Structure formats: structure tokens, C-alpha cells
Image (cartoon, rainbow, N blue to C red):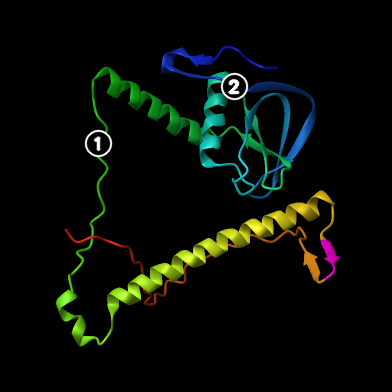
Amino acid sequence: MSLTTAYRKEGLGIASSIDRIIELSEPITLDKHDGGQDTFMGQGIVEIKTDFYHNDKPKPEWIIQVMHQMFCAEMSWAIIACMCQRGKMHLYPVKWNAPMVEIMADSYAEFWTLVKEDGEYPPIADDEKPEYLDISKHLEKTNQDLANLCSDYLQFAGAERAAKIEKDKLKESITVCLDSLDVEYAKIPGFQIKAASQSKEKKTQVGTGEFYDSVSFSIKETTYE
């Protein structure tokens, strides 16, 4: 059912509007984006999203939003419905998470305390910034045109990014074309194309306790005043 009024938690000063509430007479099992499954039954929330660039997983702010909705409506599960990059509907299950809701409730209380007391949030501490040394007068010792090297680097880096964007767009268009025909392996005169779905095991990186030297490298254009 669709809703025209918000669910409220008067004591906490919060409320939430909800897209839909559904009643399941039979259990439904949905795949989670990070592995495993969740099974829902009875009454729950449906949040509808339109986002073709979410990489086949719910955004963190969506999770927080539906958790807020569950808290206000006193429900234990929600489904986020959203189209994926290929134009297919995805249903992302979200179950009640008590530790997350506890943090949210503390944040609500902190917010209203600051409002009532005309308080302010503490400023966010800036990370210590490194000092950049002006080496203009010493470049002759390097026998290098450093400014030209930096300019060329940024030019090629920009071209590389642009090429990757165009490459990804072409890949997406080709994949959507094959997907619309329900084909994963195809051939046309001059080309053989593969766009096959496959499951890959997620791997976690574990620190070894050993360290090695690496270079953190970046260049950006500046203007001397």
C-alpha cells in the first residue's frame, strides 16, 4: 500500500515517509549483494530508487534511510528496489540492525540537544598538510624540464581517463545489446564477443606485518600569485 502520512517517533523528534508497505503471505528469499540470502515474511517496507550507476549494490545512504524507516515504522525488514546498469530490476534486502539503530538514536538525541541548547558540532580537525618546497631555482641541477614533464603527464593522464570512460561506455553498450538478445557468446562478421555472467569468490587481503617502500604520487596544476 502507498502512504500519504509519515511515521513518527514523537519522543525522539523524528519521522519518516515511506514509499510502500507490503504484506507477504508467503516467505520470499532474496540474494544479498555481499553474499548469502535473507528471507522475509509478513509486513515490510519497499523503498524505490532510480539509479543506473550504483554498481549492483545498495548505497550506504540507502541502507541508513531504510533503517530509519524501519525504526520509525517499527518494522524488521525492507527491500530496496532499483534498476541496475543493464536495465534489470534488483531487489536488495535489508534486515533490522540493532547496533546501527542505536548509533542513529544517539545521533538524533545529540542533534536535538544541540538545537535546544543552541550548541555547535565540534569542528572537524584538518589533517596536517605537508609543506611543498619551491625548487624552481635548483632545477638546472637536474638537467630536466620539470614543468614540461608535469604538463605532459597531466595531458596523458587526462587522455587516459577520457579513453577509459569511452571504453567503459562502449563495453556497456555492447553488453546491453547482447543482454537484450539473451546471448552471452556471440559472433558477427569480423568479431567474436563474450559477455558472460560469472560468479567470483570474494577475497580479503590480510596484512603480513611486513612493510615495503612505495611512492605516493600526484600532480596538480597551480598558479603562482
Give how far across and how far down residue 122 sits, in percent.
24, 36
Q: Nearer the viewer, residue 70 or 92?
A: 92
Q: Between disc 1 and disc 2, whose residue precedes?
A: 2
Q: Can residue 217 be seen in this view?
A: yes
**Circle 2 Cα neighbour tier, 10 Å, few/some/many (<14 / 14–19 / ≥20):** many
Give how far across and how far down residue 14 sits, in percent.
45, 19
Per the image, label 1 sits on a secondary structure element best described as loop
The image quadrant where one finds the N terminus is top right
The amino acid sitting under disc 1 is Pro
Q: Which of 125 and 149 is in front in this view?
A: 149
- Residue 122, label in figure: 1
Question: In the displayed structure, does residue 124 sit left or right of residue 188?
Answer: left
Q: Quadrant of residue 120?
A: top left
Q: Which residue is drawn at 62% across and 59% down?
A: 168
Give the labeled residue for mark 2: 18
* Residue 68 lies in the magenta stretch: no
- Bounds of the magenta segment: 185-189
The image quadrant where one finds the C terminus is bottom left
Q: Residue at x 33, y 27 (%)?
A: 110
